[in-house]
Every structure is written in C-alpha cells, then in structure tokens.
Image (cartoon, rainbow, N blue to C red):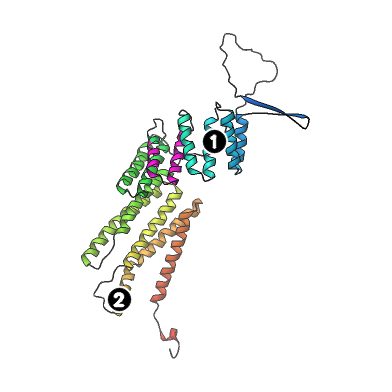
Amino acid sequence: MRRVLLASLVLTACGPKGPVDHPVDPLKPVDRVVMEPIVIKAWKEGGVIKSEAYDAALLFDEAYLRYEEGGYEDALGIYERILEEFPDTVLAPASMFNMALCHEKMGLVAEAAGIYDTLVGLYPGSSAVPDAMFRRGYCLEGLEQWPEAIEQYEDILAMTDLSGPDTVEAMSRIGTILLDAGDVPEAEQALRAAVQYFVEQSQIERFVNTFYVARAQFHLAEIYRREFEAVTFTVDEAQIREALETKLIHMVEARDAYVQTIKLGNYHWAAASGYEVGQLFRTFHDQIMTAPLPPELSTDELVEMYYGMLKEKVEPLLESAVSVWEMTLLMAERVGVGGEWVDKTEQALSSTRALLAQSLVDEEPVTEELLGPGE
C-alpha cells in the first residue's frame, strides 16, 4: 500500500495542427469545462511593472519539489497557501494530506494526526481518505495511543469498498497492537483472523505484497515463542520431565509458525523468522545449561561430571541453531535483503560458533607433551 506524498497529475490536451475538417456538431451538447482559477498579481518595483500568474497546480508542483528536497517547512507553507488561496481546488485533499506528511517529517506527529482527521471530515469522498485514515493510525501508534489506534483501524475495516491488502493490513495492525499491550488471547484471535482472511481472499484477489499477512503470521509465532521461553525448570525430577514436554510442544508450535511465515514469501519477515527459529534452539540450550543444579550434586567433581554429560546432550541444539542461521544468511544474500534481522542473525551465528569452538578446546586432553617438561 502506497501512503506517501500525493503528486498532481497534469493532463495536456493536444489537437491537430491546421484547420479542423469537421467542426463541432451543433446538435451535440457541448461539455462544460471548468478551469482552475488563476491568480495574476502585478506590482511596481523600482519603476518597473512586474507580474506573476499562478494556479493551484503550479504551487502544488513547487511544494512537491521542496518536499522531495527535504524542505518540509517550505513545502508546508506552500500547501497552506494553496488551501488559503484556492479553497475549492481539486488539489485541496492532496494538499492537506501532504501538509500532514510534512508535520510527520518535522516530528510533529500529534499535529499530523489531527490534520489527517480533519481531511477525512472535510473531504469524505476523496480518494485520499483511506490513506489519511491509515496514516492517522500510524501516528496514533507512534504516540502509543493504543485504544485510539485500534478504533481507527476498526473504522477502516468498516469501509465498504476496502481492498483485500488494506483489510489484511488493518487486521494485522490491530493484532500487533493487542499483543504489545499484553492482551494475548485477543491478539491471537485478531492475528489468526488476518491470516485466514488472506488465505480465503487470495482465492479471488491477487495480493502483490504479502508484507502484512507475513507480519501477522510472524507475531502468531511470537506468541508461541513467548510460551516456550516462559517454561522454566526446577530441581524436582517430575517437574523437569513435565517442563521438557511442555517446552518441546511450544517450541514445535513456534518453529512451525515461523516456517509458515517464511513460506509467505516476504523476505523481511522470512529473515526475521529464520533468526527466531535459530534462537529457539539457542534458548533451549541456554535454559537447560543454566537450570538449577540437583541437590544431590554435593561436590565439585559431581558438578563437573554433571555439566559434562549435560553439555554432550544439548550441544546438538547449538549445531542446529548454526545451521538455521547459515541458511538464513544465504537466503538474505541471495535476495539482497539486509537490516535489523540480518544483523542479529550474523551476531548470533558468530557468538554460537565461538561457543562451539570453545567447547572443542575444553574437550582437548591435557598431555605431558602439551604441558612441557617439568610441568
């Protein structure tokens, strides 16, 4: 969904040169063409008469160029001038939308949200309305006004002519907000609804971009990951067995949900999911290795033997993590994706490789030859 600067489209009518063979049919009604008003100003400067003529489209194009150059304050002033001097121009909704964008770029997010809301009220039939409603939702999210943001996305979902991609985005955003707010059951329901809607709607409508359905699926996986991480170990043998079983169930749920995200074909969320799948293995390893020691391990020798046996059992988890992260980085390199998740994957892979290398060093037997004479 493109919710960026709205540019004007200038259409120029070109007729044939020379005389017209077939003049206007007197029996055919003549369409009335309404021209945008033009402002002509004249003034005297140093004994010379100067003048300028402009209309809303000319100002709009100038503001657009200023915005593209990063002159948001200058662009804002021109958009305000359009609304003051040409209040009835067809470019009024686009000018107001771009005014709000300028405010966003200047860090005035609350003011931008107010302008988007005003646009929706003043120009309810404008094609800029859906984008304005979404951007107001983004602003409310940025301001952490969660109930207001959810209400905005619900208003979007109530629109009768909403496209499939926009529907998925609004549903996905509601689910993510609920998850961030800690309402896990409602979040899971909203995220599942977004994914299910995509599956059903994609049978009748082509989705060019799968970003938001992949986002919803990824956050479903995040719910299972959190449940997996929340299971802890005690020193009670029966509890340990139960915890291991529960932990494995949540781990498989999370892994499968991340894999489903990857299958949706959005490279950003595929990279994020690849990182998280590897992290599942690494977290499982770390939680087992840091679990409370059984009370019967009363001597250092027993503790050392315990950790040696434990490390041998769980080290394959590290190897699995490394394998997943290596494949994730290969995928990212192949498709040319980078960013936060690729950086995190590289860091996790490096630290885990170092841990495995240290484990090999620790296992090297100490011999007299290595120690040297007299040691």
Secondary structure, magenta segment, majority class: helix
Residue 6: numbered disc? 1
Can residue 260 be seen at all in this image of the molecule? no
Instruction: Name the spot of residue 175 as percent of width and height, x first.
Output: 36, 44
328 vs 239, nearest the viewer: 239
Is residue 138 magenta-colored?
A: yes
Is residue 359 magenta-colored?
A: no
158 vs 370, nearest the viewer: 158
Residue furthest top as drawn: 27
- Kind of residue at disc 2: Val
The answer for how far apart the CA atoms under marks 2 and 1 are is 67 Å
2 vs 1, front mark = 1
Residue at image point 33% right, 55% down? 226
Instruction: Name the spot of residue 329 as percent of width and height, x first.
Output: 46, 57
Residue at image point 33% right, 51% down? 223
Instruction: Name the spot of residue 131 as percent of width and height, x first.
Output: 47, 36
Q: Is residue 326 left or right of residue 90?
A: left
Is 345 above or below relative to 164? below
2 or 1: tag closer to the N-terminus? 1
Check the picture and name the quadrant holding the C terminus: bottom left
Q: Residues within 10 Å of mark 2 (few under 14, many from 20)?
A: some
As helix, strand or loop, the secondary structure at mark 1 comes to loop
Can residue 228 be seen at all in this image of the molecule? yes
Instruction: Name the spot of residue 354 as percent of width and height, x first.
Output: 44, 68
As helix, strand or loop, the secondary structure at mark 2 comes to helix
Residue at image point 49% right, 43% down? 109
Q: Residues within 10 Å of mark 1 (few under 14, many from 20)?
A: some
Residues shaded magenta = 125-154
Give yes or no for contact between labels 2 and 1 (Cβ–Cβ under 8 Å).
no
Residue on which disc 2 sits: 303
- Kind of residue at disc 1: Leu
Residue 235: numbered disc? none
